[in-house]
Amino acid sequence: MRLMIFGAGYSGRAIARHMRAEAEWIAGTTRARENFDRLRAAGIEPLVFDGETSDPELRERLSQATHLVVSIAPKGAADPVLAAFADFVRRDMPELAWIGYLSTIGVYGDHDGAWVDEDTAPRPVSPRSVARVAAEEAWLALGRERSVPAAILRLSGIYGPGRNALLNLSKGTARRLVKRGQVFNRIHVADIAGATAHLARGARDGLFNITDDEPAPPQDVVEFAAEIMGVAPPPEIPFAEAELTPMARSFWAETKRVSNARIKATGYRFAYPDYRAALTGLWRDGAWDIEPGA
């Protein structure tokens, strides 16, 4: 396996750490050379792609890759990787065996707390989710054109080392917002990495929700984290009184329960099936406050 990761951010670096033992090499892109050391610490050969321009070495590495992971969000209505490299993927990657595109459960839109799965038709509300649906369809179409399996991984709210309720409590930034009926799914970054590796090894294609077993009210997560740490949770704040950015408010405007049955049916088993197991493990292992290699 020779793996190229477009967008070696938080999730991309976790994927690389998980897969580096089985890969001949892993290369990944970042927007700036200042990030190169962080990528190298994750076992990634760093390359620059800022959404428009790229390192000369990028096309050479891309031509040699057998597996492609895309973890870059659309810019406006366009997917920057497709805009820059779709023709290259069509013609100049002779050994390409699998494509993985990291998307979001935001494509489902609002379902008033009802369960959804991969057979649920997307009905995105925000412009960013509309662009995600278009990108998903384009990557699936490119896979069909190349006769290469393409998997769409729809991710829920991402957390893990250096990004979690424990850290927010320690920094004094945790808030316990309460909105009746509101639940969110979550996913530990280790399970993003594990599911990506699992789908790549099996050369599986199609749509997969990569999310935990337990959609839960956000205030419950903060309260559980406080219990683990032995501190008092922050006071409850009614949602109507909360100060939120427009983007944060748009997230809270949607609520649904997302099923992960399809990825489980392929044989994948979640390392952290719910927030309790994940936060307990992060606290026990002392791995909650910083990303590995950061």
Image (cartoon, helix red, strand yellow):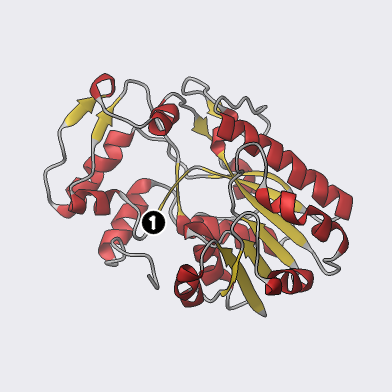
- Residue 222, by quadrant, is top left
Q: What residue is drawn where x is 12% and y is 48%?
A: 231
Residue 170, horizontal then vertical, whole percent: 19, 53
Tell whether 106 sits left or right of 265. left
Write down the residue under mark 1.
160
Residue 204, horizontal then vertical, whole percent: 73, 54
Identify the image quadrant of the C terminus: bottom left
Tell whether 101 sits left or right of 219. right
The front one of 134 and 184 is 134
Identify the image quadrant of the N terminus: bottom right
Question: At numbered mark 1, what does the secondary structure look like: helix, strand or loop?
Answer: loop
Q: Is residue 1 visible?
A: no
Under mark 1, the amino acid is: Gly
Q: How many marks?
A: 1
- Residue 119, by quadrant, is top right
Q: What residue is drawn where x is 51% and y is 58%?
A: 11
Depicted 123 relative to depicted 84: above or below: above
The front one of 275 and 68 is 68
Using a 10 Å C-alpha cutoff, classify the residue at mark 1 as few (fewer than 14 neighbours), some (14 to 19) or many (20 or more): many
Depicted 282 relative to depicted 237: above or below: below
Q: What residue is drawn where x is 11% and y is 43%?
A: 232
Q: What residue is drawn where x is 35% and y is 53%?
A: 277
Residue 278, horizontal then vertical, whole percent: 36, 54
Q: Is residue 192 visible?
A: yes
Tell whether 129 sits left or right of 89. left
